[in-house]
Amino acid sequence: MGWLFYTDRRVQTYADEKTEIARLCSSNGDTRKTELVKACKVGSTWYAAARVINLDGTPVEDATYVTDADGSITFGAVFLTRYDDGCWGYKDMEESAGPVESRAPLSLLALLSELKDPDSYANAWRQRCRDWASIPDYDEGDKIRLAAPVTLTDGSTCQIVTATHYRRGRQKRRCYRIEETGGLVRLSKASFAGSELLSSAKSEASPVLAEFMAGRGVVGTD
């Protein structure tokens, strides 16, 4: 399925989006009912868990999911979203359709029904979500060794970094001090997959001089 945009601009806020996701995950048919259990937004992507029940109270039979004890099944759905000229749009996928975006939180995965096929697209998607969730969030002052050297936009590389921050106006932004050069770098969460904590420091990081930003800047990854 392709993208669908709402030209009436009725979706403008986070609350509007969540309400619309709930509506899209809900239906009342002649024999079945589907309802939203949980929805989470990560970046511009919504992840949802939706429960299906039979109106006559009999267990739901499905080729993909194992029926839960209450007779229902709960599946995962992914909604890509974006705004185009002020109009909100979405593209939806069920987890077994092999969505690429895989950052659903563990709390949402825990609500989903078991899968019958361990080699299914849905199972691979859930594992990618678990892999993403397992990437550590380091604290200020932590010294970290990346699993492999990361190539930066200026062509240099780094592997051992210390978590710190810099300020831009009133905003405090996370960055990392490179062990070899002392320079600062912005790193994506994916850069820390398989990383190792070398040492931990709970004290506040020393302030970064404003002229550092003005003169040298902060290097980013490709």
Image (tube, rainbow, N blue to C red):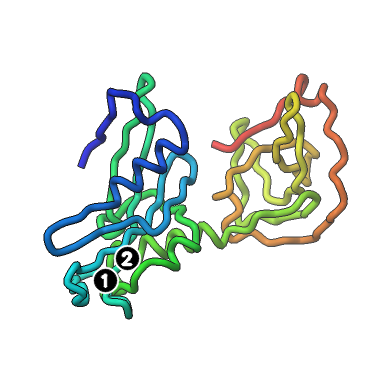
**Is residue 45 positioned above or below 126 on the image?**
above
Residue at the location (21% across, 76% down)? Answer: 59
Numbered disc 2: secondary structure:
strand
The image quadrant where one finds the C terminus is top right
Looking at the picture, tell me which residue is in the foreground, 34 or 65: 34
Looking at the picture, tell me which residue is in the foreground, 7 or 190: 7
**Is residue 174 positioned above or below 54 on the image?**
above
Left or right, 207 with respect to 160, comes to right
Outermost residue toward the left in this view: 30
Give percent across and percent down for residue 73.
Answer: 28, 69
Crowding at mark 1 (Cα within 10 Å: few <14, some 14-19, many 20+): some
Residue at the location (71% across, 40% down)? Answer: 175
Give percent across and percent down for residue 134.
Answer: 56, 62
The image quadrant where one finds the N terminus is top left
> Pointer 1: what residue?
65
The amino acid at mark 2 is: Thr
Left or right, 152 with respect to 198, comes to left
> Pointer 2: what residue?
74
Give percent across and percent down for residue 36.
Answer: 35, 55
Left or right, 161 with respect to 148, comes to right
The reply to whether the C-beta atoms of the residues labelled 1 and 2 are less than 8 Å apart is: yes
**Is residue 118 positioned above or below 216 on the image?**
below
CA gap between label 1 and label 2 equals: 8 Å
* Precedes in sequence: disc 1 or disc 2: 1
Q: Quadrant of residue 67?
A: bottom left
Residue at the location (61% across, 53% down)? Answer: 192
The amino acid at mark 1 is: Tyr
Numbered disc 1: secondary structure:
loop
Crowding at mark 2 (Cα within 10 Å: few <14, some 14-19, many 20+): many
